[in-house]
Structures are given as C-alpha cells and as structure tokens.
Amino acid sequence: MFKKLVKIILNYLSKLTVEQEDVVGIDITPGCIRVAQLESSKKKWTLTKLGYKYIEVQGGYNAAKDLIDSNPQQYVNKLLQVLNSNKIKTKSAAVSIPVSISYTKVVNFPLMTDVELKEAVNTDSLWENAEQIDLPGNLDEYSIYWQVLKRETAENRMDILFVASKLDDIDKYLDVVRHAGLNPVVVDVRCFSIRNALELRKDLDDSDQTVTIVEFGAFENYILILHKNSPFIRDIFLSDKDRIAIFDQDSSDDSLKRICERYGMQISQMISTYQSQYKQSIESLLISSTMTNIDRVLGYL
C-alpha cells in the first residue's frame, strides 16, 4: 500500500507545473552531478547558473556503478559543493534520474481510442496483459510513464512508448537531493529531461526538424530521436570490458578507437532503422556525455 501511494505521488510530481516557483535542475549519474538554473523573462529562457562535480571513485568502473548504494554521502557532499560554489539558494529541485535504472520499450497494442486507453492504463490492465513487457516484480513497485507514438488505423494497431522506473531506485537519487536540503518537485528520466530542455531551444523549435541525441559514456548509452515530440529511443550496447576501458583514463588510443567504431556502427544501424520506419531524414546529431575524456573519445566516433 505504501509503495502504491509513493507511486501516485511520483506520477503527480512528474506532471507538476512549477512556473510559479524557482526550481534548480539536478542531473545525477553514477559518475557525475550537474546543476543548472534558468530564469524566464519575456518568454525567453536564460541560463543563469551552471555547475558540475565528478564523483571520485577508488576501484574503477565496477566500484563506480554501485557507488550510490555503497556511499551515497559522497553524492550529497558533491551536490552541496556545487550548490554552494554557484550560490544557489533555491530549495525546489527538478531531478533527472539515469536511463540505466529504467525499463524502456516501444510496445504494440490493438488500436484504442483515448478513452479506452485511459481506462486501461488507470486499471493497470494494459500493462499487465502486454506480453512484450517483462518487468521483474509487481507493477506497484514502479513509476510508469507512457506516450502514444503513432496510430495505424489501416492496420488496427498503435505503438506506445513504455518507461518504468523502480520506486526503490528512484528513492536512492531523491534521498541524495533531500539530504542536500532540497525538495524534489519534479522527477524525470534523463533522456526525457533532455527532450524537455530542447523545447527551449528556439533554433531547434521546428516541427519538421528531426533532433537526434546520443548519450555516450561508461554508464549511460542510448540514442534518442525526436520528431514532432514523438521520441524514438534505443539502448546502445557496450560490454563491461568496453565500459571499463572508457572509464579508465589510461586506456590506449587503439582500444578507444575500436570501441568507438563498434559504437558508431550501432548508431548508424539505429538511424537507418528509424529512417526506414518513419521516413524522416537525419542530418546531424547532438552528443551528451559525462565522460571526463569526451574530447579525446569524440575524435574516434
């Protein structure tokens, strides 16, 4: 019952409009904390505060990926350092959580009206009866986000983006924010936080333009393609061996080059799949990363 209540609250918070209060954006990944604050004036947003801190880890990638479990206080300390150094006094926070703790899938369903879909979602019967969704545990243990991507009337089917994050995992990140003295008022998965941020970019505010974002790093790897606010998202595979090499500052150029070649092939395949399926051209992409050596790595991508 408690988890169900938390789920309702989180779903509500994620949809809150916070236009009437100052909010600081906090992005937490296993290796880095980033903070940003914007001000709105005459329908224009201006970035006023920006800061970040890398998380110091002894033991390499394997120690870093579980550090929020073993040493959450380090994240609290780093967050406080960023807030203090940037003189951020705002107490309300919009929190971005990693894609890697979320289950993301495009699911096919028989065509439904908005009323039928809402009823099925409200009773959880839609997800419980979907054979394509394979979540460990019960639905009550998750915060769920969904969005209709497209409806195919002729084929009597529809595609829905399904994103589920375990409440216990979300709470680990919210605890960091709370212990730093902040109040989380919005919670979102990182890729969708980026999507929302891009809506403020006037140079990208073209309904016919397709925006492509690639997240590249030891912890987060995915491609997000946006057209008319409909997201196409796919995980990009990196083996543990490759993740360790990327995390290691002393990895050889040959090793990084081979990793980037394999990575680039996956990106090309996913873009080709998207273009074939949605008939949209892609001319450029944006790279997002928390890697300290991203400039070096980009030379091989």
Image (tube, grey):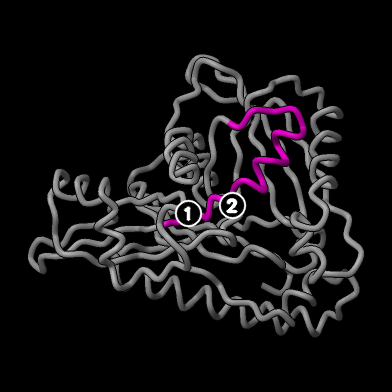
Give the side of residue 120 with respect to residue 147, left or right: left
Identify which residue, 45 or 105, lies in the foreground: 105
- Residue 141 image point, x, y percent: 48, 54
Label 2 Cα neighbours within 10 Å, binned few <14 / some 14-19 / many ≥20: some
Where does the C terminus fall, quadrant-wise?
bottom right
Within 10 Å of disc 1 (Cα), the crowding (few <14, some 14-19, many 20+) is: many
Q: Where is residue 148 drawn, in percent x and y? A: 28, 53
Q: Read off the residue under disc 1.
A: 141
**Residue at the spot x=36%, y=68% of the render?**
133
- Please report contact status of discs 2 and 1: CB closer than 8 Å, yes or no: yes
Q: Under tag 2, what secondary structure?
A: helix
Task: State the image quarter where residue 110 is shown.
Answer: bottom left
Is 90 situated above or below 294?
above
Residue highlighted by disc 2 = 168
Question: How many numbered circles does the render carry?
Answer: 2
Residue 238 in the image: above or below residue 105: below
Q: In this image, 244 relative to 91: left or right? A: right
Three-letter amino acid code at disc 2?
A: Asp
| Residue 165 as seen in the image, left or right of residue 74 | left
